[in-house]
Image (cartoon, rainbow, N blue to C red):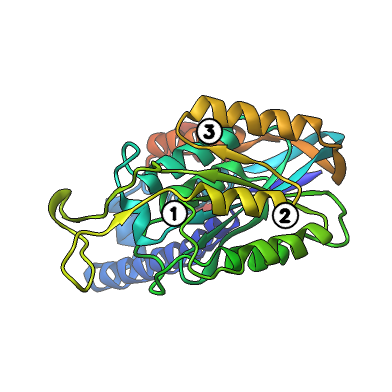
Amino acid sequence: MFQLEEKIWFWALLVIPVILVLFLMLQLWKRSAQNKFANQAILKRLSPNKSVFKSVLKIIVLCLAFASLVIALVNPKIGSKLETIKREGVDIVFAIDVSKSMLAEDIAPNRLEKSKQLVTQIINNLASDRVGIIAYAGKAFPQLPITTDYASAKMFLQNMNTDMLSSQGTAINEAIELAKTYYDDDQQTNRVLVIISDGEDHSEAAASVAEEASKEGIRIFTIGVGDVKGGPIPIKRNGVILNYKKDRQGETVITKLNEDTLIDIAKEANGAYINGRTTDKVVDEIRDILNKMDKTEFEAKQFADFQDQFQWFLGLAVLLLFIDIFLLERKTAWLKKLNLFNENL
């Protein structure tokens, strides 16, 4: 099997016709200038060792070297073997609260950053499960569809912030409704929704929506981040606290971890509530939960174990460049004997 890794570099081959055209124009200009100076017979006497063939050979070698370098950049690969990969796992969707209350620092460094740390560590302990990410505040927004690309998942995760959604508030029911669309009905895997939040739910409909999700085979596990005693919501600029969020009466807003809401949601969807204060404890509990679930095969495909071949073309390019360097435009003894293009006549 054959594969080209970076096909875009093939566009660089368009440089070769440009080089050839410029070379041809240069040769025509040289000949025109020489004819103005003297006729061909006199020029041959003045430059008896000048080789037309050498000039042509040099440009051909240079173009071949450039073409080899381009092919090396394309990096052709040859498949050496075929393997069948079967994946078994669970579809896990992480719904992360990005409302302003998640900026409270009653858990270090703050609730949102703690949520990111928890999800990152959970992903690091997964094997072949698929993951998806949802961000929600007053509305829910799909951040990453179901995938096995854990690196992309963690990249999207780190970019999440409280400014990514203009609609503020906390509507957990929106996140559950959106999560339902993440799972593929054609691939009946175990479906898990992990909600990471401080439990402040402004919709008051999350429990009933969670019950509906349970009927569709979705188990919901909730992780509470924050402190039941609560904390203020800092307003920062360049990392410096300027003030704290206040209500209409001018009083500092204190946001508290509402575990009861999260417990009710998990209970309605055949799941469990986990306090997110200790990262290792959360990771261990989620791992135990996933290990007890039946793994469903959701992907089986053949692929080739490709091996890079760019080094051969890179070596050829270097060799051709060395040849070009040592190819002088003067006739050599062996070239005189060959008398290519009847240059000695």
- Rendering coords of residue 2 (x, y %): 77, 45
Say which of marks 1 and 2 sits in front.
2
Residue 164 as seen in the image, left or right of residue 236: right
At 47% from the left edge and 65% from the top edge, which residue is drawn?
170
Say which of marks 3 and 1 sits in front.
3
Give the camera-side residue of 323 and 200. Answer: 200
Q: Which amino acid does label 1 sit on?
A: Val
Residue 152 as seen in the image, left or right of residue 188: left
Q: What element carries label 1?
A: helix
Identify the residue position indicated by label 1 in the image: 52
Q: Which amino acid does label 2 sit on?
A: Glu
- Rounded to the nearest angstrom, the CA distance separating label 3 from label 1 is 69 Å
Asked where in the image residue 145 lies, by quadrant, the reply is: bottom right
- Rendering coords of residue 238 (x, y %): 15, 52
Residue 98 in view here: yes
Residue 64 in view here: no
At 51% from the left edge and 65% from the top edge, which residue is drawn?
14
Crowdedness near tag 3: few (<14), some (14–19) or many (≥20) residues, C-alpha within 10 Å: some
Give the camera-side residue of 305 and 343. Answer: 305
Q: Which of marks 1 and 2 is nearer the N terminus?
A: 1
Residue 50 as seen in the image, left or right of residue 7: left
Q: What element carries label 3?
A: helix
Asked where in the image residue 25 lies, by quadrant, the reply is: bottom left
Identify the residue position indicated by label 2 in the image: 268
Crowdedness near tag 1: few (<14), some (14–19) or many (≥20) residues, C-alpha within 10 Å: some
Note whether 210 is above or below 1 in the view shown.
below
Q: What label does residue 121 carry, if any?
A: 3
Q: Which of marks 3 and 1 is nearer the N terminus?
A: 1
